[in-house]
Amino acid sequence: AKGRPGELAQHPPIMARVTVSDIVVHNNPAPFLSEIQLEVTFECSQALEEDLEWKVVYVGSAEDQSMDQVLEEVCVGPVPVGVHKFLLQAPAPDPRRIPISDLVGVTVLLVTCSYLDREFLRVGYYVNNDLPDGSYAAHAAAVAAHEAARAAAETAAAEDEEEEDDDDTL
């Protein structure tokens, strides 16, 4: 939507009114099932009448966005002019919602901020999920077994489909 002339001078875009100066990760490193604690510092150059919506999102799989988990949503506002600081706490991601092959390795934790349902900030942190010493072999075996079972199920489904196609030709 186009604004009226001079509207930007009265109401600059939200990006110009809110500046995030720091996000401190308090419990780093931490066990996988630990609560996530982020201290957010931001400055507001013009008062905001509506809430800022902050989200913490865990990317469960790089290949499938449906595996993303919104760990926390917090509204802050109305926001007066000045510097503001708050602790954004989020529960750990649910490992049952993460593909077994993606439980270990590098993923991303996102912190986003929206105003009036428009996202204007996205900060990503690389997260390296590691296993305790000696458990790599067990994890690799579990992943291999999971992949083999999935491949077998796909093969069986394809064979069933072929049999159905053969029945249609009689």
Image: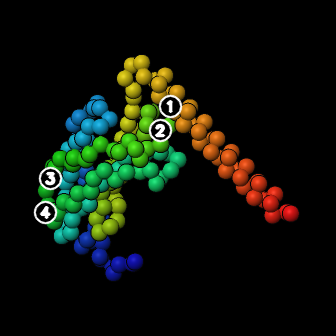
Q: On the rendered structure, is 118 left or right of 142?
A: left
118 or 158, which lies in front? 158
Q: Quadrant of residue 113?
A: bottom left
Instruction: Say few, some or many: other residues with alpha carbon within 10 Å of mark 1 (under 14 / 14 to 19 / 20 or more).
Output: some
Mark 3 residue element? strand
Q: On the rendered structure, is 26 left or right of 59?
A: left
- Of badges 2 and 4, nearer the viewer stands 2
What residue would you read off at disc 4? 80
What residue would you read off at disc 3? 83
Q: Are marks 2 and 4 in contact (CB under 8 Å)?
A: no
Give me the residue at 37% from left, 23% from top: 132
Which tag, 4 or 1, sits closer to the chain's start? 4
Which tag, 2 or 1, sits closer to the chain's start? 2
Q: Are marks 1 and 3 in contact (CB under 8 Å)?
A: no
The Cα atoms of the two marked residues, 2 and 1, are separated by 8 Å
Q: On the rendered structure, is 28 left or right of 97?
A: left
What residue would you read off at disc 1? 142
